[in-house]
Image (cartoon, helix red, strand yellow):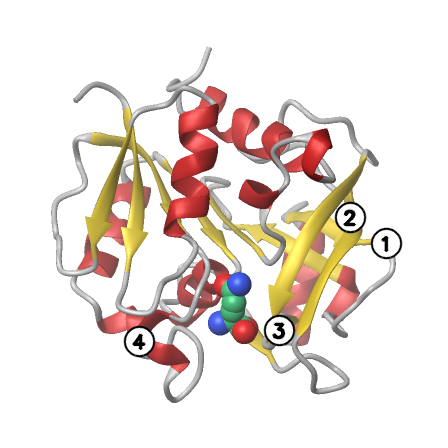
Amino acid sequence: MDKAVGVVVFPGTNCEHDVVEALVDLGVPHRLIWHRETDLMDLECVIIPGGFAHGDYLRPGAIAKFSPVMKAVSSFATSGRSVLGICNGFQVLTEAKLLEGALQKNAGLSFICDVVECEVASRNSPVTSSLELGEKLRLPINHFEGNYTCAEDDLKRLLDEDRIILRYVDNPNGSIGDIAAICNKDRNIVGMMPHPERAMSDLLGSSSGRKILASLLERSAVLS
Ligand SMILES: NC(=O)CC[C@H](N)C(=O)O
């Protein structure tokens, strides 16, 4: 299959079909990747969707980081191709140390299921390169552990290197610096708590997520 996007599935992942629906909507070929797979090199882009990988046991992503696919995700990213972790995918990427920081329990200790406003804090990422700086986005969130935190020097580095990609306008979960999405130093690994795949159409509340995914897929040359 040509230029496909991989969607990683761990036991307990539950948003893979939302991502697949979004990719189908965008007309992009995809392949589901079981967490035991170790070769992703036929793909152009990898998405780690939301859910509860390995039941979130110990803490979200703590077991998923040992799944065989994660070594492959790391090599895939080293090859320069893009990786997007959405919600639980972001949690997995921080646990795997592919992104710094951690997602801790929401301030207020409740599960939040809502649509929130975010703004583009940097255009220098695969998911925001076709958006405007400061552009407001309406995106669904759906998490208990979405409160991003990191060491002070990591936060300084994120700021200095322009690696904060999205910020919450009205911080719903206590995330440091209102952070909703970050990228790595090479700018090809992105973690975001909001769910772009659930914001694909104005008719269903918002099409902000469509812009994010379209930007990612254009960058990965699977969408022109
Ligand atoms: N939507 C998701 O990916 C959810 C969940 C996540 N594991 C949490 O509750 O923090």
Residue located beneath label 4 in the image: 54
Q: Quick one: which residue is furthest to the top in this view?
A: 224
The answer to whether mark 1 and mark 3 are in CB contact below 8 A is: no
Q: What residue did someone put label 1 on?
A: 169
| Amino acid type, mark 3 | Cys
Residue at 76 percent of width and 43 percent of height: 138
Q: Nearer the viewer, residue 87 or 190?
A: 87
- Mark 1 or mark 3, which is nearer to you? 1
Q: Amino acid at mark 4?
A: His
**Residue 192 image point, x, y percent:** 58, 53
Would you say 38 lies left or right of 163 here?
left
Label 2, residues with CA under 10 Å away: few <14, some 14-19, many ≥20: many
**Of tags 4 and 3, which is closer to the observer?**
4
Nearer-N-terminus badge (1/3): 3
Lower sequence index among marks 4 and 3 = 4
Q: Quadrant of residue 207?
A: top right
Cα separation between marks 1 and 4:
32 Å
Q: Position of residue 194 (x, y in %)?
A: 63, 54
Depicted 121 relative to depicted 213: above or below: below
Left or right placement of residue 117 versus residue 5 in this view: right
Describe the element under mark 1 as helix, strand or loop: loop
Residue sitting at x 40%, y 25%: 220
Task: Kindly report the distance in space between the C-alpha atoms of the residues bearing marks 1 and 3.
Answer: 20 Å
Mark 1 is surrounded, within 10 Å at the Cα level, by few (under 14), some (14 to 19) or many (20 or more) other residues, namely: some
Distance between the alpha carbons at the discs numbered 2 and 1? 5 Å
> Disc 2 or 4, which lies upstream in sequence?
4
Q: Secondary structure at mark 3?
A: loop
Which quadrant would residue 172 be assigned to in this image? Answer: bottom right
Whichever of callouts 2 and 3 sits on the residue coming sooner in the sequence is: 2
Relative to residue 146, is residue 75 depicted above or below? Answer: above
Q: Earlier in the sequence, mark 2 or mark 1?
A: 2
Which residue matches tag 2? 118
